[in-house]
Structure formats: C-alpha cells, structure tokens
Amino acid sequence: MKPSLAVRASCWSADHAGAVVALWLVFVAVTELPGLAGGHRLGDGSLADPDVAATWWPLVAAPVAVLLSAPFSRLLLVSALFTTVVTTVSAALLDTVSESVAVVPRTGDAALLVVVTVSVQHMLFAFHRRREALAGGNDAARAARIVASTAGNAALVSGSGVAASLAALALAGTAELRPLATAVLVTVLVSAVAALSLLPALNDLVLSAPKPLPRQPPSQWKVGAPPRFVRPAMIAAGVLVLGAAAVHGSLRIFAPGHPGSRPLAEDVDAGGVVVLLLMLGVATLVVYRRPVVALSTLLLNGVAALAGLGMLALLVDPLPGWAPMVLVVVLLVPANHLQVYLLHRLRSETLAGMSRRNTVADACRRAWSASGGALLVTVVMWLVWGLTESGDVREFALATAAILVVDTFVVRFYLLPRLAVLGGRTNWWRIRGPKDAR
C-alpha cells in the first residue's frame, strides 16, 4: 500500500535534511524582512517583538532537555532550533496577517503560546517514538520510518483537524472572534508543516550522528508506593473539581439571572463554540471512523470548555470580556493535539489485543512520557507570561495555567481513555499498511 502523505513528506525531509533546513532558514529570512524594514506591528514588548521572542526558546528548550535526561545535549539543540524557527515564522506571519485582520498584541501573544505548546508536543512525541524504535533494535533508517509513520501521521491528523475547525470558526464566528481564530490558525499551520518537514530534517542531521544519544538514567529518587486510598481519592477529587466547575460554567452561561456577577453569555460566542466543537468531533470521526470515539471527543471537549469557563469565572474577578473565547480556543487546540497522540496509543494497543485495563494503563504511560514534558513547558510559559504582565492579562494567564493542568489530568488522561475503549476493537479501523505503523 502506498505510504500516506505524512510518511512520504517526513521521509523525504529526512533524506534531504540539508536542503530542508536551508529552505526553512531562507523562509525565516523572507518572512522577517517586512517586519525589519517597517517595524513590528505586534511589537512594543509583545511576544512578536524579536527582542522578546528570542528570550523564550531557552525557557522552552531547557525543561524539554531536562525531562529527557539529556541537558545541553543534541536534544537541546534540536528543541532550540525547532521552537525558535517555528516561533519566529509564526510571529512574522502574524505581523503580515495583522495588515488585513485586526490582531491585537494580546491575541498574538496567546496564539504564539499555543504554537509553542503544540510544537513541543510534536517534538517530544517524535523524540520518544525515535527512542522507542531504537530501543527495539531498529537501525536509524527504519527508526526514522517508524517515527514518520506515527509522529508524522499524528501531526498531519491533529494539524489538519484543528486547522479545519479554526477555519470554520473564523468564517462562522463573530467579527470579534475572527482575529483570534485567524491568528491561531496561522500558527497551527506553521507548526504542522514544520513537524512534517523541519523536525525530521533536524532529527536526521543532529540525532543521527555516530555518537549515540545518552540513555535515560534510572531515577535517583526512590519513592515508596502510596497508600491504596491515595490514587482513588485524587481521581475522585479531580472529577469532583471538574464537575463542579462545569456546573458553575453552565450556570454562568445559561442562567442570566445568576447572582453575583455578569453572565458569561454576553462574552461567549455560542455559535462559534458549537462550530468549533462540532468540527473537532467530525474530524475525529473522519480519521478514526467510529462514532464512539467521535462522540467521546465531542462530549469531553464540551465538558472541558464549560469547566474551563467556570474555573476562569472563579479565578478572575472581574472577568474581562475578551477572556472567555480566548480561553476556549487556547484550551481546545493544544488539548486536541494531545488527544490525537493519546488516541493513537489507545488504538494501537487495542488492535494489538490488550485488555481494556491494560490498554488504558499502557497507552497513558507511553503518551505521558511525551505529553508530561509538553504540559510542563506549557504551564511554565503561561506562568511566566502571567508574572511578567499586569492587570487582567496577568490574572487570565495564571488562571489558564491551572485550567490546563486540570484538563490534561482529568479530561485527557482519565476520562478520555475510559470512554474511547468502551467498544474494544470495534472502535477502531485497521490500517492496511506497513507493520511498523504501530
């Protein structure tokens, strides 16, 4: 069977690594020329300002390298180059787009934080797939193909699904929502294209050197097993917090007479949110071809949006009018990239014949090895942005960091796997392709 577009693009980029990296550097120079000539329209201290953006890649790369137990090694170099190029190109394109769409600095900052989060997800997933492939006895060429057939396909699926949803949101949403959807759409497209071309090229140039990557050493911290009641208690507390926040968010949206504060219905574009949720569900249905998985995605994304709005209303007072819709987009876009990677793991383990319990445990463990680093970087970025800003932007950024943690742990790593494996093998369609797709 002919390889997919993602596999062919990733393999071609790995085979022509020097040319791909050179083309990306030329593209960076071309996109930066208008901004350097006329000044950055999103500058003045925003993340699109080159002086500010240049200081962000160490913040992203250092936690990635530490998490991979290879500080200041070739992994740090790859992460630094990849995140720097993607952030720089995204900022330059946002400057260009702002000529026709009114993208304010706050919207541009949120979009750039999203693109760094998504890029780190792509990068860590590829790193861990490569490490697993090499540990399985594969040579460098076959490991590159395995990474292309898994990380590449995941990048294509997540990027195209989210891009289609954001495009529909930009077309169907209100005039106030269009700049945000357009800005995030631009950055998501840049990240997806870079994950299919620049990332395989950098991996081939930097990580395929004769000197092997350092093995991940065993942890020096020996922590005893917690009492048996701790894990159920933590899960129950997380689900309770999520449910209470979702109820509070529902009341703030659907109960205009809710005492104490301004209803969120005045700030939430209900039509835009519904379009975004439906498009993400349809994209999941098209890819995985099973209603249970699509319905789980639709249901959990809706609950996550309500819970996020409820937590935001509790943590930020008074709540600025721009914050609710920014939160919905910022919450759902990176979460659905993570969700695609997790669904990929669930699908492969289920089709391999694992029981439901083992499927959930193994898929979550494997996905967490990469997604945990992305969550760490995301939280650090939002915390730093919040601590360096003031006023309502500061409160929003700090609240968003807490909301992302709850969404990742409770919705994506607890509720989603248990809903997605309810139907067993009947939930998934089997790809007739190379055996290394797993």
Image (tube, rainbow, N blue to C red):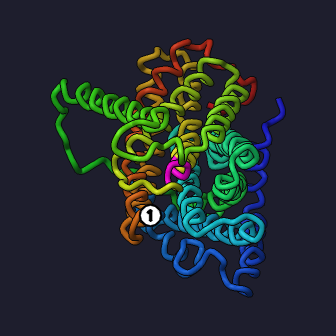
Percent x, y of residue 334: 55, 47
Can residue 415 be spotted in the picture? Answer: yes
Q: Is residue 433 magenta?
A: no
Closer to us: 131 or 114: 114
* Magenta stretch, main secondary structure class: helix
Q: Which residues are magenta?
A: 323-327
Taking 234 as reference, is 337 left or right?
Answer: right
Closer to us: 161 or 265: 265
The answer to whether residue 192 is above or below residue 365 is below
Taking 328 as reference, is 187 left or right?
Answer: right
**Picture quadrant of residue 427:** top right
Percent x, y of residue 40: 66, 80
Q: Secondary structure at mark 1?
A: helix
Residue type, numbered disc 1: Val
Which residue is identified by label 1?
393
Percent x, y of residue 331: 51, 46
Report the residue at 36% width, 68% height from top.
387
Q: Quadrant of the C terminus?
A: top right
Q: Name, please, the residue furthest toward the front.
A: 257
Percent x, y of residue 297: 57, 28
The count of marks equals 1
Report the residue at 39% width, 72% height from top.
388
**Picture quadrant of residue 246:** top left
Q: Quadrant of the N terminus?
A: top right
Report the residue at 47% width, 63% height from top.
60
Taking 55 as reference, is 16 left or right?
Answer: right
Report the residue at 44% width, 28% height from top.
362
